[in-house]
Amino acid sequence: MEPPSSINLPLSLKTMYDIAEFILRSVELISPDQTEKMVDTLARFYENKGGKVLVMGAGRSGLVGRAFAMRLLHLGYNAYVLGETIVPAIRENDLAIAISGSGRTKLIVTAAEAAKDAKATLVALTSYYDSPLGRIADVVVEIPGRTKYSQNEDYFARQILGITEPLAPLGTLFEDTTQVFLDGIVAELMMRLKKTEEDLRRVHANIEL
């Protein structure tokens, strides 16, 4: 997807094309079966009216998780974000959603293990199925993207796009791709749950900072 007159574009705008191209190519790599399993899990869980959804992520992945948790709340889920002061205890029949590109961020793996110990269902979004997080999850969705750890892992992203580190430092590609993927999940959940934009608007906060 070569941008028109890219030679005359500032690097910041050219980078937007590069990241968008990475996301488009990632669509071909994300498993439809894994995606459907995540959607099915969330759709079935919606009937568990007393159940809680806890979204977990560290750093920028945590910010992506917060955006997703907000949309889950708008859809009618009892959603919380790890680290907030009002998070209740997670118990059996609850749902935890963990986001970690490497699948080995200690804070998130430890939190995910605690959720599993409490007998909650665990959904993991990671670039590595066979990671500590992926191995303990009930549902795994592999999201392509460069993670912030090793050069060996960076090779995965470079093979897809050839993007260089300064254009998308650390976990940018994973985080951006996960954000767009989760927005797609929200769109499908709206259809499955027969929710309209007006339904979401009625739940949206009417007092904001």
Image (tube, rainbow, N blue to C red):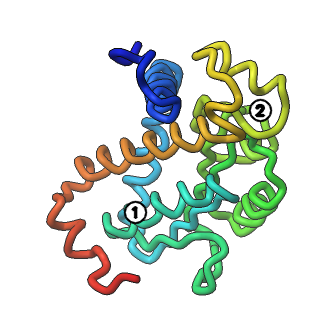
Residue located beneath label 2 in the image: 130
Q: Position of residue 100 (x, y in %)?
A: 68, 47
> Dot 2, crowdedness within 10 Å: few (<14), some or many (≥20)?
few
- In the rendered image, the quadrant that contains the C terminus is bottom left
The amino acid beneath tag 2 is Asp
Image quadrant in which you'd find residue 6: top left
Q: Position of residue 4 (x, y in %)?
A: 33, 16
Viewer-nearest residue: 25 or 45: 25
The residue shown at (63%, 74%) is 90
- Quick check: 89 left or right of 132? left
Residue located beneath label 1 in the image: 72
Query: Which of marks 1 and 2 precedes in the sequence?
Result: 1
The residue shown at (63%, 50%) is 99
Image quadrant in which you'd find residue 208: bottom left
- In the rendered view, would you say 23 is above or below 174? above
Viewer-nearest residue: 29 or 32: 29
Image quadrant in which you'd find residue 143: top right
Mark 1 element type: helix
Viewer-nearest residue: 190 or 159: 159
- In the rendered view, would you say 31 is above or below 200? above
Q: Give the CA separation, mark 2 to mark 1.
A: 27 Å
The amino acid beneath tag 1 is Leu
> Dot 1, crowdedness within 10 Å: few (<14), some or many (≥20)?
many
Could one spot residue 27 in this view of the protein?
A: no
Q: Position of residue 25 (x, y in %)?
A: 48, 19
The residue shown at (60%, 15%) is 160
Mark 2 element type: loop
- In the rendered image, the quadrant that contains the N terminus is top left
